[in-house]
Each structure stands twice: as structure tokens, then as C-alpha cells.
Image (cartoon, grey):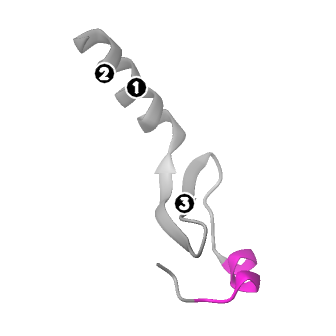
Amino acid sequence: MLGAPLAACRRIDVEPLSLTDFRSDGHRWMLRSSGVPVAAKAARSQSGKAAS
């Protein structure tokens, strides 16, 4: 949980071609991950399909 006002969201530095994941439980927002390279996520996704 960030504990910051909504306006602070505009100040989060997000890397180009990366994944930043926010989640909400209806009351507050949580920053789950930031700066995860999109290519790495795709590779994990493909390896998970191969294992199935």
C-alpha cells in the first residue's frame, strides 16, 4: 500500500516498455510491481504454457 494521495500516481517513474501493476481492493490502491520488462513477462508466460 502506498499511503499517498491519488495525485502522487502521476509522479511514479515508469520505465518505457515495462509493466507496472496497480491493484485495488475498493478502498485503497497498491503498487504490486513496477519496471518489469515486458519481454521478461512474455518469456515467463510462454514457459508456463510449455509446462502445461
Closer to the N terminus: mark 2 or mark 3?
Answer: 3
The residue depicted at 60 percent of the width and 89 percent of the height is 4
Residue where numbered disc 1 is placed: 45
What's the mark number on residue 48? 2
State how far apart marks 1 and 3 are (Cα). 20 Å
Q: Identify the main secondary structure in magenta.
A: helix
Residue where numbered disc 3 is placed: 23
User: Is the residue 40 above or below the residue 31 in the image?
Assistant: above
Comparing marks 1 and 3, which lies closer to the viewer? 3
- Tell how many labels: 3
The residue depicted at 64 percent of the width and 75 percent of the height is 12
**What's the magenta region?**
4-11
User: Where in the figure is residue 50, as x and y percent of width and height?
Assistant: 29, 10
User: Where in the figure is residue 42, as x and y percent of width and height?
Assistant: 47, 28
The amino acid type, in three-letter code, at marker 1 is Ser
Kindly indicate the quadrant of the structure image that contains residue 8.
bottom right
Q: Are marks 1 and 3 in contact (CB under 8 Å)?
A: no
Is residue 52 found left or right of 36 in the rendered image?
left
The residue depicted at 54 percent of the width and 56 percent of the height is 21
Please tell me how crowded label 2 is: few (under 14), some (14-19), or many (20+) other residues with Cα within 10 Å: few
The residue depicted at 51 percent of the width and 70 percent of the height is 30
Is residue 12 found left or right of 48 in the rendered image?
right
User: Is the residue 23 above or below the residue 9 in the image?
Assistant: above
User: Where in the figure is residue 43, as x and y percent of width and height?
Assistant: 39, 27
Comparing marks 2 and 3, which lies closer to the viewer? 3
